[in-house]
């Protein structure tokens, strides 16, 4: 107990305030408190040193006739030397840039300086009071009281320095006064002690107020720089950290890498399980990433499902690669969200400093461009920035902005491409294909803008446009004709999709069994259960499902086994080489047989020549689609469209 008091006292000397009841502070908070304490005092230091010298001269003048002049001069000289030393020290260190943190050593020094100055002042009454004239004693009493009060006041933010300064003065004064043996001075000594106690108490209270103010300032600063959901530093803090590592790069040549991350399937988790589950996923992802980084690395949440990591000291691409792989590896295990196992992958873009740039703007832009490439490749992987990505990224951003405008400005329209029954040679229906007439760039192919729309929520609005307009158009066709609409996998994760489609069917009076939805294989695993459920619901209402671009995706066979599909559309890549490569012919043959064995219908897409058509007919493929039959046409050409006769002539030839 006693020892802990002495330990606390020793720490108090170093500026630690636990003795006063302040809770133990971490290094950062303690450093910040010290900054506030020191900076207030530093402002007055030089003026106070001058005041000390003036007081010393006044005292010496008052005592000159009664006290020993040599001793007086020695005392005054030591005071002047000490004050000038402090004065000059301050001149040499003007502290132009306010430090963020101050060490305990500085606090100890301030206590030592306070103690030394207080001791010089305490020596004056000790040496001279008893031999002074009444006139000198009055001056000394006034001066001592003044020094105790003003010293404590000036050093109010530094309690250890304030005590070190006032205590020796008081002691020296009391001893000096008692040396006279005159009873008249006893109340003066008692009063001085009372003043000292009162003033030290005031200093302590003031210090506590200061600490509390600094602590609440730190708390609010932290809150402003922390992402409330994940507890990670937020965008604002990230910018500050980025500036710090850039400064380190400029001053010390220490390179670093910057990784931009985006969770590939976050939106689908949000749509499927709700926002609370989405939040849980973000928290889980943040915890895993934080755990796999080094102390010196910095991870921030920039907003939504975007994160950024600064790999400090990483100069080599292979080290950045390792870091990216480590981050990716943390996503291999599924997340437990709303009682289900969900796998989510991030895409990562990497920029290296100084190789890719030395300023924050540039690096952020380049990491973002590399991220875009990763997202486009949809691998749940990473990419380094390459110069050619710059243009692509700008282009993408411009296109994203233009796409938003396109819906409002009515720049979309639909064209329709027929399916031909290979037995009857009759048109069985049409596939709706989206077209975008850009005011400057002309017709933009869907292969260019659909992937960009899929990266944002725009795909929902665009998909809605397609469904509404296509269903409205198809409702005017003969009753045996079906309508096929391309659907992005992302749309299938929208909970309201089924109701939306049923709503349009009802609104325009199109029977559900005339609608077919084409889905393309993709590596989106997170929502696969949701996708399967939605497809079952759609089929339960009589809507049929077609697997588009069969054979080109990641897992055609898996899809065929697990998804409730009615038709498969063999990709035109295989049809186009039927005549020239035996491999293509074999793949097409096998695909047709496989689909038939599984009880699915088969459509061959991209049929361009009569020979291709003849080949497919021989295989008993059900339907064909392609330029040979017709190119996609505007809705108003459908009523007069008759392809069969021409085709019969071709295939007979
Ligand atoms: P897809 O669904 O496989 O559509 C077939 C694409 O092949 C269409 O290109 C069509 O014009 C083209 N095509 C048809 N026959 C032939 C042929 O004989 N030869 C050649 N070389 N090409 C042929 P398009 O319209 O540019 O569409 C490209 C892709 O964009 C579509 O592939 C589809 O995945 C997507 N897409 C188009 N419209 C929509 C839409 O409304 N929603 C969604 N989510 N995706 C769409
Ligand atoms: Mg299609
Ligand atoms: Mg296709």
Image: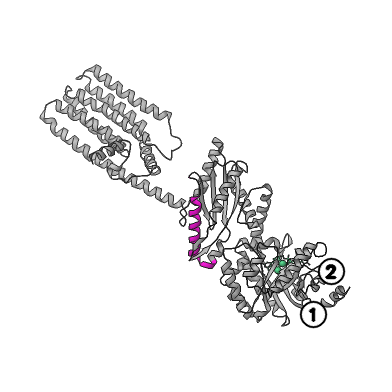
Label 1 SS: loop
Ligand number 2: quarter of image? bottom right
User: Which quadrant of the structure image shows residue 551?
Assistant: bottom right
Highlighted range, magenta: 271-296
Residue farthest toward the right in the current orientation of the protein: 653
407 in relation to 473, above or below? above
Percent coordinates x, y for residue 301 in the rendering? 51, 53
Label 2 SS: helix
Q: Residues within 10 Å of mark 1 (few under 14, many from 20)?
A: few
| Residue positioned 66% across, 66% down in the render | 557
| Residue positioned 74% across, 62% down in the render | 442
In the rendered view, does 371 fall on the left or right side of 82?
right
- The residue singled out by tag 2 in the image is 611
User: Which quadrant would the N terminus be assigned to in this image?
Assistant: top left
Q: Which mark is residue 424?
A: 1
Does the beta carbon at disc 2 come under 8 Å from ligand 1? no
46 in relation to 101, above or below? above
In the rendered view, does 488 fall on the left or right side of 641?
left
User: Which quadrant would the C terminus be assigned to in this image?
Assistant: bottom right
Q: Earlier in the sequence, mark 2 or mark 1?
A: 1
User: Which quadrant of the structure image shows residue 545?
Assistant: bottom right
The total of numbered circles placed on residues is 2
Q: Main secondary structure of the magenta part?
A: helix
User: Which quadrant of the structure image shows residue 562?
Assistant: bottom right
In the rendered view, does 300 fall on the left or right side of 79?
right
Q: Report if residue 274 lies within the magenta region.
A: yes
Measure how far apart labels 2 and 1 are at the Cα level.
Answer: 18 Å
């Amino acid at each position: 107990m006693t020892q802990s008091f002495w330990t606390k006292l020793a720490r108090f000397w170093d500026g630690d305030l636990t003795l006063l009841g302040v809770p133990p502070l971490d290094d950062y908070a303690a450093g910040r408190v010290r900054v506030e304490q020191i900076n207030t005092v530093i402002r007055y230091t030089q003026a106070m040193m001058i005041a000390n010298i003036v007081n010393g001269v006044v005292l010496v003048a008052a005592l000159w006739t009664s006290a020993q002049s040599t001793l007086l001069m020695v005392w005054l000289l030591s005071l002047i030397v000490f004050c000038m030393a402090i004065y000059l020290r301050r001149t040499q260190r003007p502290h132009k840039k306010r430090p963020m943190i101050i060490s305990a050593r500085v606090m100890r020094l301030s206590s030592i300086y306070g103690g030394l100055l207080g001791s010089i002042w305490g020596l004056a009454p000790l040496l001279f009071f008893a031999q002074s004239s009444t006139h000198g004693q009055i001056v000394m009493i006034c001066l001592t009281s003044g020094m105790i009060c003003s010293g404590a006041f000036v050093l109010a933010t530094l309690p250890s320095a304030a005590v070190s300064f006032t205590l020796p003065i008081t002691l020296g004064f009391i001893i000096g006064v008692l040396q006279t043996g005159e009873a008249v001075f006893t109340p003066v000594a008692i009063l001085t002690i009372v003043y000292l106690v009162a003033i030290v108490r005031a200093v302590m209270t003031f210090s506590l107020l200061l600490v509390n103010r600094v602590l609440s300032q730190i708390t609010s600063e932290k809150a402003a720089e922390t992402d409330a959901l994940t507890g990670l530093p937020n965008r604002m803090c990230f910018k500050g950290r980025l500036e710090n590592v850039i400064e380190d790069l400029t001053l010390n040549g220490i390179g670093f890498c910057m990784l931009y991350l985006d969770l590939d399937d976050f939106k689908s988790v949000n749509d499927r399980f709700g926002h609370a589950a989405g939040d849980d996923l973000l928290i889980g992802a943040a915890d895993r990433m934080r755990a796999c980084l080094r102390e010196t690395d910095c991870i921030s949440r920039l907003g939504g499902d975007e994160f950024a990591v600064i790999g400090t000291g990483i100069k080599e691409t292979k080290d950045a690669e390792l870091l990216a792989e480590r981050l990716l590896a943390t996503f291999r295990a599924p997340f437990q969200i709303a009682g289900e196992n969900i796998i989510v992958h991030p895409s990562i873009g990497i920029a290296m400093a100084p190789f890719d740039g030395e300023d924050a703007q540039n690096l952020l832009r380049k990491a973002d461009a590399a991220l875009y490439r990763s997202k486009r490749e949809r691998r749940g992987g990473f990419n380094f920035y390459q110069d050619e990505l710059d243009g692509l990224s700008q282009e993408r951003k411009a296109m994203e902005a233009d796409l938003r405008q396109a819906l409002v400005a009515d720049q979309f329209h639909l064209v329709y491409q027929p399916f031909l029954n290979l037995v009857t040679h009759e048109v069985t229906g049409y596939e709706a294909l989206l077209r975008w007439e850009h005011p400057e760039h002309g017709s933009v192919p869907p292969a260019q803008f659909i992937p960009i729309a899929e990266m944002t929520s725009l795909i929902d609005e665009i998909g809605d446009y397609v469904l509404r307009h296509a269903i409205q158009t198809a409702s005017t066709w003969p009753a045996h004709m079906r309508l096929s609409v391309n659907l992005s996998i992302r749309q299938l994760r929208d909970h309201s999709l089924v109701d939306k489609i049923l709503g349009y069917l009802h609104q325009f009076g199109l029977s559900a069994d005339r609608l077919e939805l084409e889905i393309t294989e993709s590596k989106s695993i997170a929502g696969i259960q949701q996708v399967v459920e939605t497809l079952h619901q759609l089929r339960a209402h009589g809507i049929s499902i077609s697997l588009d671009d069969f054979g080109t995706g990641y897992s055609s066979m898996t899809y065929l086994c697990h998804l409730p599909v009615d038709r498969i559309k063999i990709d035109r890549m295989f049809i186009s080489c039927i005549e020239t490569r035996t491999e293509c012919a074999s793949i097409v043959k096998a695909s047709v047989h496989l689909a038939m064995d599984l009880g699915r219908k088969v459509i061959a897409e991209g049929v361009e020549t009569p020979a291709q058509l003849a080949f497919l007919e021989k295989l008993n493929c059900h339907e064909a689609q392609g330029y040979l039959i017709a190119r996609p046409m505007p809705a108003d050409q459908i009523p007069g469209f008759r392809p069969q006769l021409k085709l019969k002539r071709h295939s007979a030839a």
